[in-house]
Image (spheres, grey):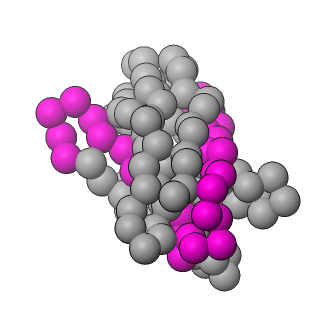
Amino acid sequence: QVQLVESGGGLVQAGGSLRLSCAVSGSIFSINHMAWYRQAPGKQRELVALITRAGNTNYADSVKGRFTISRDNAKNTVDLQMNSLKPEDTAVYYCNAASYMAFWGKGTLVTVSS
């Protein structure tokens, strides 16, 4: 089992920044890659950013150049630095771990006001 707990969400004005953090515990050795997803009201959950065990990253086109995913193996955390936020970034952000199955956190709400 893998447990994921997100933190760092909140309300921010357009153009501002937020940093999300995901605390990872449990069978960490079984994790292949970590990711952040988001789900806006009335929309499907979508991949925002992914980081592999080797440290390779991948981003949705909509966040490239604005968001950065990183991992701290010593602290067992995966962070998402979000800059130049836009109202369309408003969503619940979920941490995801890909292991023998997919594990999800409960999510943290990010609201960007115009």
Seen at 62% across and 30% down, the residue is 8
19 part of magenta stretch: yes
| For residue 32, side relative to residue 74 (left or right) | left
In this orientation, does residue 82 appear? Answer: no
| For residue 27, side relative to residue 63 (left or right) | right
Seen at 30% across and 40% down, the residue is 39
User: Among all residues in the image, which is located at the extreme left?
Assistant: 42
Q: Nearer the viewer, residue 96 or 101?
A: 101
Q: How many marks?
A: 0
User: Among all residues in the image, which is located at the extreme bottom?
Assistant: 54
Q: Quadrant of the C terminus?
A: top left
Seen at 60% across and 32% down, the residue is 7
In this orientation, does residue 78 appear? Answer: yes
Q: Nearer the viewer, residue 26 or 67?
A: 26
Residue 86 at x, y = what percent?
A: 43, 34
Q: Is residue 77 above or below residue 13?
A: below
Q: Is residue 49 above or below residue 110?
A: below
Residue 43 at x, y = what percent?
A: 18, 40
66 part of magenta stretch: no
| For residue 74, side relative to residue 16 (left or right) | right
Q: Which region of the structure is painted magenta?
A: 15-44
Residue 35 at x, y = what percent?
A: 49, 60
Q: Nearer the viewer, residue 37 or 58?
A: 37
Quadrant hosting residue 60:
bottom left
